[in-house]
Amino acid sequence: MTADAAHARREPRPARSLEEIIRTKRPRPLHSVDDLMAPDVFPSEEEVDEFVQAYHEERQANLG
């Protein structure tokens, strides 16, 4: 039996309720947009600015 066949025969997990997910993850409230920042994604402010500029240019190019 292949791994794919064994995986296909497994019963699907029942959907978890939002309350169950919250209990498991124990999220904390956001107090600021800074809480969403991922450290070390962009090493400098210049790289952030370059990314935002490239993003806007790409969006404008795709609009028409």
Image (cartoon, rainbow, N blue to C red):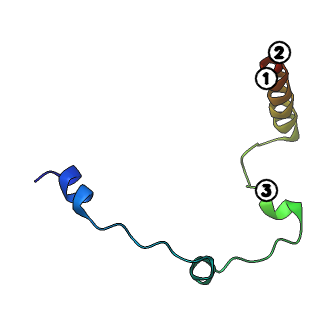
State the residue lying farthest toward the left.
Answer: 1
Mark 3: which secondary structure?
loop
The quadrant in which the N terminus is found is: bottom left
- Marks 1 and 3: in contact by CB < 8 Å? no
Q: Residue 58 has which mark?
A: 1
* Vertical side of 19 occupied by 45: above or below: above
Work out how far the residue at label 3 is from the one at label 2, CA to CA, in angstroms.
Answer: 32 Å
Identity, as a three-letter code, of the amino acid under mark 3 = Met
Residue behind mark 2: 64
| Coordinates of residue 57 in the picture (x, y in percent) | 84, 22
Rendered image: mark on residue 37: 3
Classify 10 Å Cα crowding around label 3: few (below 14), some (14-19), many (20 and above): few
At label 1, which amino acid type do we have? Answer: Glu
* Residue 13 position by quadrant: bottom left
Q: Position of residue 3 (x, y in %)?
A: 20, 53
Amino acid type at circle 2 is: Gly
Counting every numbered tag in the picture gives 3
Q: Which element is circle 1 on?
A: helix
Which numbered disc flags the more N-terminal residue, 2 or 1? 1
Q: Which one is earlier in the sequence, the residue at label 3 or at label 1?
A: 3
Residue 36 position (above or below residue 11): above
Q: Residues within 10 Å of mark 2 (few under 14, many from 20)?
A: few
- Of tags 3 and 2, the one toward the viewer is 2
**Distance CA(mark 3)–CA(mark 1):** 23 Å
Q: CA distance from mark 2 to mark 1?
A: 11 Å
